[in-house]
């Protein structure tokens, strides 16, 4: 799944550790989400949505491969 997490984080001048602290997850989790190695759980996606005041769809976009699997 594609996401804008790195850009959104950088716009706020937050490190991965800063964002992880705000969400109650590890820095490694943030790195894995940003690099597309891990798709967040729905509760974590909602936390991100609330934190950035954006809809989940504004943060995450499925790839063509994701869409073919549905």
Image (tube, rainbow, N blue to C red):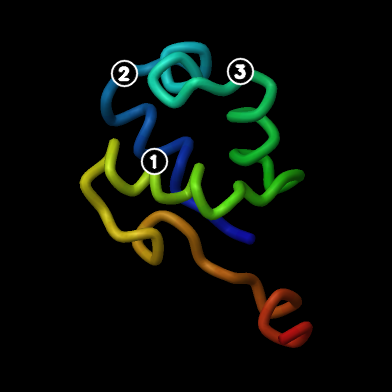
Q: Quadrant of the C terminus?
A: bottom right
Cα–Cα gap, marks 3 and 2: 15 Å
Instruction: Answer with mark 3 or mark 1, whichever residue precedes in sequence.
Output: 3
Instruction: Answer with mark 1 or mark 2, whichever residue precedes in sequence.
Output: 2
Q: Residue 65 placed where, x, y %?
A: 75, 77
* Quarter of the rendering containing residue 29: top right
* Quarter of the rendering containing residue 13: top left
| Residue plotted at (63% across, 40% down) | 33
| Residue plotted at (48% across, 59% down) | 60
Q: Image check: 24 left or right of 34? A: left
Q: Are marks 1 and 2 in contact (CB under 8 Å)?
A: no
Secondary structure under tag 3 reads helix
Q: Residue 16 placed where, x, y %?
A: 51, 19
The circle on residue 70 is: none
Q: Residue 56 placed where, x, y %?
A: 39, 59
The circle on residue 13 is: 2
| Residue plotted at (57% across, 23% down) | 25
> Which residue, as the protein is rendered here, is positioned at the far front?
43
Instruction: Answer with mark 3 or mark 2, whichever residue precedes in sequence.
Output: 2
The circle on residue 27 is: 3
Q: Residue 22 placed where, x, y %?
A: 38, 20
Q: Which residue is mark 1?
A: 47
Between 32 and 13, which is closer to the camera in this rendering? 32
Please, is residue 67 above or below residue 59 in the view?
below
Q: Quadrant of the N terminus?
A: bottom right
Cα–Cα gap, marks 3 and 1: 15 Å
Front disc: 3 or 2: 3
Secondary structure under tag 1 reads helix
Please, is residue 70 above or below residue 11 in the view?
below
| Number of callouts | 3
């Amino acid at each position: 799944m594609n996401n804008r997490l790195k850009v959104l984080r950088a716009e706020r001048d937050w490190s991965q550790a800063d964002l992880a602290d705000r969400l109650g997850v590890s820095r490694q989790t943030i790195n894995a989400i940003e690099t597309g190695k891990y798709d967040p759980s729905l509760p974590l996606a909602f936390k991100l949505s609330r934190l950035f005041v954006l809809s989940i769809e504004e943060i995450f976009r499925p790839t063509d491969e994701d869409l073919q699997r549905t």
